[in-house]
Image (cartoon, helix red, strand yellow):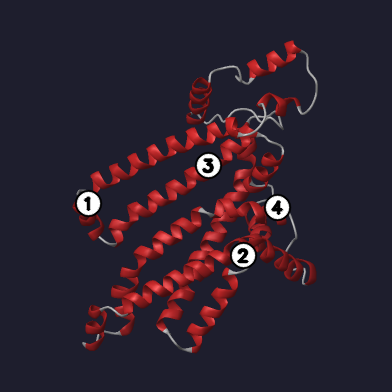
Amino acid sequence: MTILKYVGRRVLGVAITLLAASFLIFASLYAAPGDPADFLTQGRTLSPEAMASLREQYGLDDPFLVQYLHWLSGVLHGDFGTSFQFRDDVTTLIGARLGTTLTLMVMAAVLITVVGLTAGIVGSLNAGRAADRLVLVMTTFLAAVPSFVAAILLISVFAVRLGWFPTFGGGEGLLDRIYHLTLPAVALSLTFVALVSRVTRSAMLEELGREHVEVATSRGVPRSTVVRRHVLRNALGPILTVSGILVAGLLVSSAIVESAFGLSGLGSLLIQSVDKSDFPVVQAITLIVVGAFVLVNLLVDLLQPLIDPRTLAGEAGR
């Protein structure tokens, strides 16, 4: 199988997945109890003429498929509709909060990758020793700590008692934003760091037990070279796959952390919109979350042949 066919199949699969996801997300509006028009009126009593005008404005009288195609056409042009709650363009609302969430996710992803990989590698290269036991204890503890608990502890210690970091807000400018988002990024990444570390350790230990690694070591090849060329490279496949899934899930987990730290991001907007039954905003953010998850996994799939060329051969065999 050529690389172009491999990429083409993956892109086609992503397109079909996103189309199916968009249909299910939009259909969820009809699965929710009640009439969307009732959420628009917020309990107020309107005249039949005003109610008819409101339904016409939001296209609620159109058949389901017509509404879906109209919504999908708008999404493809960057228009997610109008918010029921704010009476403002959904794209504008999301755009105003996207920077905070993206910065938080990037900072958390860097922490997850650097700390998780380092801890996993250190543990695997010192299997059975004190360093490995320390890594296992710490990762077990971190994996059991929910994000909201970590957020409360970090605020209590580093913001309230020590006063090193602010307790809320996203900051202004790049450096100030990084400063404000340090504690949220740590709270968001702790559980993911533990998972990546465990996967890295397991994958590395499996590769360290391979016959070709033992042969290379017996022939006097330096340990650093063996680890770099034979162990780490072959272990990157499962590590990359799991890391991609976890990083894509950051957008969902960020909702709790953003609420804890008073951040004006997509996560807090999603919680607020669910509480207020603001369907257009919920649909838009849900679609963004699904899209981010699918695209990150596509990127992981495209990187796999670069790490292990046997991936293409396996696809051709199937």
The amino acid beneath tag 3 is Ile
- Depth check, mark 2 against mark 3: the one in front is 3
Residue tagged 2: 186
Query: Disc 4 versus disc 1: distance between alpha carbons?
Result: 46 Å
Residue tagged 1: 318
The amino acid beneath tag 1 is Arg
Location of residue 221 (image quadrant): bottom left
Mark 3 or mark 2, which is nearer the start of the sequence? Answer: 2
Residue occupying the point 49% across, 22% down: 65
Q: Secondary structure at mark 2?
A: helix
Residue occupying the point 48% across, 24% down: 69
The amino acid beneath tag 4 is Ser
Q: Residues within 10 Å of mark 4 (few under 14, many from 20)?
A: some
Q: Residues within 10 Å of mark 1 (few under 14, many from 20)?
A: few
Query: Can you say whether 125 is above or below 155 in the image?
Result: below
- Judging depth in this view, the residue of 50 and 293 nearest the camera is 50
Mark 4 or mark 2, which is nearer the start of the sequence? Answer: 2
- Residue 226 spot, x, y in % from top left: 29, 79
**Residue 140 left/right relative to 218:** right
The amino acid beneath tag 2 is Val
Residue occupying the point 44% across, 38% down: 18
- Residue 297 spot, x, y in % from top left: 41, 51
Mark 1 or mark 4, which is nearer the start of the sequence? Answer: 4
Location of residue 53 (image quadrant): top right
Query: Disc 1 versus disc 2: distance between alpha carbons?
Result: 42 Å
Marks 2/3 in contact by CB < 8 Å: the verdict is no
- Depth check, mark 2 against mark 4: the one in front is 4
Query: Can you say whether 147 is above or below 58 in the image?
Result: below
Mark 1 or mark 3, which is nearer the start of the sequence? Answer: 3
Residue tagged 4: 259
Residue tagged 3: 288
